Amino acid sequence: MIIKWHGHSCFEIVAEGCTVLFDPYADGSVPGLAPLHLTGDAVFCSHGHRDHNGEETVALSGDAMPLEVETIETFHDDKNGSLRGNNTIHILHGEGMRVAHMGDIGCPLTPVQAEKLKNVDALLIPVGGYYTIDAAQAAEITAQIAPRVVLPMHYRLGAMGYDVIGTLDAFTSITPVTPVMRYAENLLELTPETPAQTAILTYAGR
C-alpha cells in the first residue's frame, strides 16, 4: 500500500490496484499550497469545507472501487457540531490492513468509536488545533487507538497552512508512537512489516 500526502489533509492511497483520495482541498483554499490535479478511482471528504471538499480537483476513472471504506460520524468541534458541523472519519480496508483518515475531528472519541479504530495500521490525524484537535489532544487519541504508524496532517509549516494553527513540532515532541521518522518524499510504503513510527512526509507541491 502506498500512502501519499498532497498537503494539508489530502492523502492518496493506492492499494490492490485502486487509487483513493481523501479530503482534497479546493484551489486557493489553503495558504501556501499549489492547486491539485489528481486522478483516482474514488474520493472521500470528511465534511463540506473547501479545504477538505475539493472533489472537483480529482478526475475519476469511472472504474469500480473494490476496497471497503467504513465510516464513523463525529464532530468538527467540541460542542456537538454547533460551531462547525459534523465530521466523518473514513477507515480504508486494503492489502489486509486498515488506514483511518480522521478528517477535521474536533472532539474526543467515544469508547465505542475508539474501539472501532483500535490498532489500525495507519492513523492520519490532524494536530494543528484551532479548527481541529490540537497536538495534545491528537497525542491522547493516538494513545487511545494505539496505531502502528501515525501520519500527522493539518498543521502549519512555514508558508504552508493557516497561520492560526500549530506547527508539527508541537505534536512530534509528545507523540506516543516512536520513533519519529522524517521522509524526503511525500510517500510512505505501508506493509504488514512496516515498523511502528510517526511518519513525517515532505510536501512535494505540484
Image (spheres, rainbow, N blue to C red):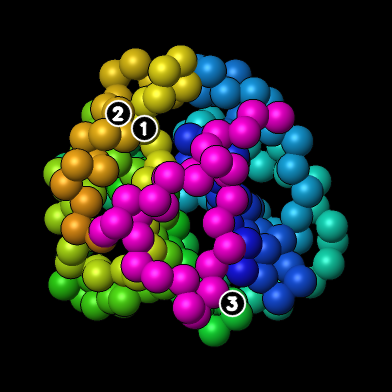
Q: Amino acid at mark 2?
A: Thr
Q: Is residue 86 above or below residue 19?
A: above
Residue 162 showing in the rendered view:
yes
x%, y% of residue 124?
41, 54
Nearer-the-camera pick, 108 or 156: 156
For this view, does 28 lie left or right of residue 196?
right
Q: Residues within 10 Å of mark 3 (few under 14, many from 20)?
A: some
Which residue is at the far right? Answer: 62
Answer whether labels 2 and 3 touch (C-beta < 8 Å). Answer: no
Answer whether labels 2 and 1 touch (C-beta < 8 Å). Answer: yes
Return the disc, 2 or 3, that comes first in the chain's sequence.
Answer: 3
Mark 1 element type: loop
Find disc 2 in the rendering and name its residue: 167
Residue shown at the point (41%, 18%) measured from the top left: 158
Q: Residues within 10 Å of mark 2 (few under 14, many from 20)?
A: many
Q: Amino acid at mark 3?
A: Gly
Residue shown at the point (43%, 45%) measured from the top left: 182
x%, y% of residue 100?
43, 64
Find disc 1 in the rendering and name its residue: 155
Mark 3 element type: strand
Give the magenta-colored segment's residue range: 178-206
Residue 187 highlighted magenta (yes or no): yes
Residue shown at the point (48%, 35%) measured from the top left: 8
Quarter that holds the C terminus: top right
Find disc 3 in the rendering and name its residue: 94
Classify residue 153 by image quadrant.
top left
For this view, does 129 lie left or right of residue 26?
left
Return the disc, 2 or 1, that comes first in the chain's sequence.
Answer: 1
* Circle 2 or circle 3, nearest the eye: 2
x%, y% of residue 2?
62, 62
x%, y% of residue 57?
72, 37
Magenta-drawn stretch, dominant element (helix, strand or loop)? loop
